[in-house]
Structures are given as structure tokens and as C-alpha cells.
Amino acid sequence: MRSSGRPGVSEILEKINFRAFVESIIAVAVGFLIGAIILLAFNYNPAEAYTALFRGGLASIDNIAATLHYSTPILLTALTFAIGARTGIFNIGAESSFYLGAIAAVAFTNIWGNLWFGLLMGMALGALWALPAALLKVYRGVHEVISTIMLNWIGWYLISWLIVGPYADPNNPIKTIKVPENARLPTIGNTVLSWGFIIAVVAAILVYFILWHTTLGFGMRASGYNQRAARYGGISPRAAMMWSFIIGGMASGLGGAMKIMGEYPGYAISQGGSNIYGFGFDGIGVSLVGRNHPLGIILSAIFFGMLKAGTSEMQQTGVPLEIVKLIQGIIIITVAIPGLYDLLKKGLRRAA
Amino acid sequence: MEVETIIFLLKTSLMAMVPIVLTSVGAVWSERAGVVSIGYEGVILASAFFGAIFAEISGHASIGLLGGLFIGALFGMLHGILTVYLKGDHVIPGIGINLLAAGLVPFGIMAYWGTAGQHQLPFKLWHFKIGNSEFSPMILVTVIVAIATWWVLFRTPLGLRVRACGENPEAADALGINVEKYRFWSTVYGHALAGLAGAYMSVDWLGLVHKTMSGGRGFIALANMVFSNWNPLLSLIGGWLFGFFDALAIWLAPKHIVPEQFIYMLPYIMTLVIVAGIIGKAKPPKWDGKPYKRE
């Protein structure tokens, strides 16, 4: 079988990092466990809450469509963080590139009502917004955590102004003008799910391909491992970092554009930016649980999308929806524990 | 400009300065020891919530402040264990803490007081009067903490050892300094000050708990830390400047001369320009954010 050139099952299994997979599962379990303890402490029934949460995300075709719908934007912002992480960069600027992608979609589709033009401009503005952090990093050695946080806030106030100012809907001042009908992403069947999900999955596979099957991607990963070694190998870490920010910005920009162009029935940004806020930060968690691997991210985005889709059903049992955010925070802190797998194994051995 | 306007701007900027300076000074100390944290935003929010609970249970706003300090220290211990002792990444736990607090606080407000989003406190901290204006004693505390932290950090052997842990932990270790211990307690101190800042916001300045009350102050404090080139005294001045922009925006907003969003943007743009090196390149401690493992 091996001579055929196709990888066998065992080789595929080897390629999937089993240890990383188990660590993510442990982190998720710890998140839910501590979440349950907090629910109990405040006199809620965790079993009831969690059952409703999973039912809301999975129980019917419509619920599953909602899960995939919610997973779309966070899949793309997670790619931004993952591309950065693979290049040795802490790019937490997905949040503001997402805003810029969203406002670009509104602005440019109203100039020319074309779907692809809107998506393209979303990606372009997302990348453009990542550029200052890239230039500061490459030419000034400014740490990207500081510059991307500053850009996130500048971007936030910029779009806050654009929403109430130039792009406010004159007939309905609680949101921006709408994306024209011929530039909207069609939905799949009779659900809330748009073709944006398919585009996001394709984007993840594309990022996987770039990182692992192109010279550029090799250079990016190499400078992520060891900049000095990469330089000896004839790779320019500067170019690798620049591309990392640019491709990352494009991913979030696309996410922001699709959030607005594919969201039935609004197709507009609401006042206060409430429907475009927080996706960049959620993406960081999605990426970490997906172990910064584009294919792992597809799975973890669907998982986090399911949590989002399930919250409204959980709320009906009287549990505040914010418990989900709390669980996400605990999952990320748990992911940050180094050698979690070994710690657990040691602990289990001692217990046995 | 009328006298009243000047007094308003001065008073508001001093009140707004407190949380930013306290957090910055804590972050400066912790980063001087080599530990980076971006979780201060979450610490401020969580401590504002728990500080209010402590205050209401005890009936004293000052107990609320201490409670905030304590909760901040707990977060510092969590961050310290992950980064200093387990040698984990410095940025990821901060992201987790921020998310955790963003979920915990609205959940807690709902679960504890049964209201969505906001809870008003029945009392505030005692204020002293100058003329017709009231001032919080926390303004004085903040100034004292900033000066004292600078003095200890740059004028005492303790400060020298802390800075050695951030600049050259190998040399510090060779001199018999317990790098892990210094780094751990520096992290605790940094987060405790952020906790005090959070409790100040709920039990003193605003007199309420709101689910987004931290409003980016944890991040502004980090920007101010860079702005001040990791110096507590400059953090005090920088923090007041940030507070002044807050006050200016509050004063200008109803006048509609400039969209208020552009005023809010200014401190962040300033920080970017400054770190870009137009005024002078900001230099973090050499081993900032790098785990130190003994050979």
C-alpha cells in the first residue's frame, strides 16, 4: 500500500498530534467541570444547564445549521492567531481587522453591489489594518501584543464613529446601511447558515496548504521555530513576519465581511457594534484549543460555535449566558498549563 | 475657559488617573522582574465585582478596597504559578483571565444581585473636601504608591534584585538570588495593585458594578507602562495624561465639536507613535516575558 504514494491510516494517525488532541479535550473538560462548580455555588443545576446547551447546539438540523453559522467568524479569526503563532508572533489584532472587514463590506458593496468585490475589500482592509503592527514589529522591534492591542482600540473607536456617522442608516438609526441584496451571501436551504461557512473551511485548508506545502509557509514556520537558524538557512524572518500579519489580517477581514454579508436578516452592523464585537478574542481561544493547526481549528471552531448556538436554549433554564464565556476563559487558562498531558498521567499513576 | 471647567477637568482627570496608575505601577514592577501579563483588564473587572461584594457584606467601602487587593493577589498567584513555576507562556493565561472575568462578572451580577448588567452600591468611600469639591483619598494613595514603588525599585537592594531578575536572571541566580521567588511575588504585587484599582472603581469612583466597567483600562495601563519606559514615576505622569483625555472626552462629548470617538482614540495613537520611536525607543527589561530555567 505504501508504494502507491498515498499515506496509510497509521501514518495519518501519526500526523495528528495525539498528545495535543488529548490536552485540548482535558482543557475542555476542566472548563466544564469548574463551570459546573460555579453553577452549583450559585444554586443552578449544571446538568440541566449543560443538557440545554448541547441540545440547543445539536438537537435539530436548524440547531446544527446555527452551530456552523456561529463557527464561521471564529474559525477565521482563529486562523489569524494560528498563522501568527506558527510564525512566532502573538498577533491578537484579529479583533480590529474583523471590524474593518465588516465596515468595508458595508461601504464597498454600497458602491458596487457585488458579492466578490465586498469579500475582497473586506480582506484588503483587514490586511491593511494589520500593516502598522507588521511594520512596527519588523522595522522597530515593537512587541506585537502592545501594537495590536492599541490598533484594536483605535479600530473600535473608528468603526464606532463610522457606524453612527457616515454609514448610519438614515431610516433606522440603530444600525448601519444594509449590504445591497445582490451582494449578500446566499443561505443554505431554509436555515441561517450561509455559504460563508464553506468559504471559511476552504480558507482554513488554504492556510494549511500555504503553511505546510509551500516555500513561503516553510519559511514562516522555520522563523517561528528559530529565527537565527532560519536566517542561516537563507530565509528572511522579516518577510515571513510581514506575510504572517498580512495573511492573518486577510483572514479576519474576510470573517468580518462575511459576518455582515451573510447574516440573515440584518445585513448591517448594529449600533455599538454589538454584532461584530468579540470575535477576534474568541478566535484566540478557538486557535489555542485547535492547537494552532488549521485543521484542528475547523473542529474547535465548530465546538465553540455549538456553545454559542446553545446559549439561548440554556438561558431558558434561567442560567445567564455568560457562563459560556467563563468556561471559555477557564479552558484557555488550562490550555496554558505546560505539559498538561504529562501532569495528568503522573497524577493518574499516583492515584492508581 | 471658566474656573469651573478647569476644576472639573482637574478633578475628573485625577479620579480617572487612579486605576490606570495603580495598574501601570504594578505592571512595571512585575515586568521589571521579568513577568508579562495582559490579564489586568480582567483582574480590574473581577476585583470591581468582588470588591463591591466585600464592601456590602462588611458595610465598609474600605474593606471592599482590601477585598479587591486580595482578589487581585489571587489572580497574581494563578498567573505566577503558570508562568514562573510551570514555565508556561506569559500571554495566554492573561487572555484566559480576561475572558474569564468578562464571563464571570455579568454572570455574578445576575446570580448575586439578580439584576442584568448593573448594580448600584448603597454607599461610597469617604471623601475629603477642598473648597466645594470632594476628592477621594485614593488619589493620595496612588501618588504615594507610585513614588514608593519607584523608590524601592531604584534605590534599595530589594529593587536591585527584582530588576536583576528581569534583566539578567542567570547572573542574579549566580549571586544567590532566588529568581523564581522574586518573580512570583512581583507578579502577585502587580496583580494586587490592579485588584485595588478595580475595587476603587466600584466602591469609590463610580459607586456601581457594571459588566464592562473596566473599559479597556487594563490595556491602557499596559500602554502607559510602555509610554513610561517601565518607570513608576513616569507612569504617574502618563497615567494622569490618560486620565486627562478621559476628562476631556467627557467634557467635549456633549459639545459635538469633534466626534468623541476621535478623542478616545488619541491615547492609543500616542502610544503607537511613542513606541514607534519618534520620541525615544521604549526598552523593556531584557528577559521580560521569558521563562527562566535553572541549568
Image: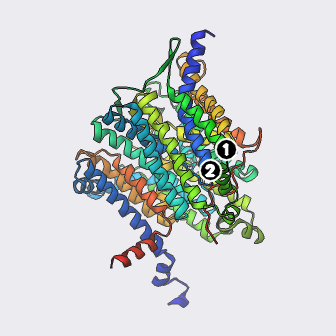
Image position, residue A326 (x, y; %): 38, 50
Q: Determine whether A103 is above or below B9 in the image.
A: below
Report which quarter residue B256 is drawn in: top right
Tally of numbered tags: 2
Q: Chain of mark 2?
A: B
Of residues B47 and B127, the one nearer the viewer is: B127
Q: Earlier in the sequence, mark 2 or mark 1?
A: 2
State how far apart marks 2 and 1 are (Cα): 8 Å
Residue type at tag 2 = Glu
Of residues A76 and B56, the one nearer the viewer is: B56
Camera sees residue A113: no
Image position, residue B174 (x, y; %): 69, 66
Q: Chain of mark 1?
A: B
Q: Determine whether B128 is above or below A120 in the image.
A: above
Find residue A211 and name its label: none
Residue type at tag 1 = Trp
Marks 2/1 in contact by CB < 8 Å: the verdict is: yes
Quadrant location of the N terminus of chain B in the rendered image = top right
Q: Are marks 2 and 1 on the same chain?
A: yes
Residue at numbered disc 2: B31
Q: Residue at x 61, y 47 (%)?
A: B29
Image position, residue B97 (x, y; %): 46, 50
Is residue A183 found left or right of B203 in the rendered image? right
Image position, residue A223 (x, y; %): 68, 65
Camera sees residue B226: yes
Crowding at mark 2 (Cα within 10 Å: few <14, some 14-19, many 20+): many
Residue at numbered disc 1: B230
Q: Residue at x 45, y 69 (%)?
A: A340
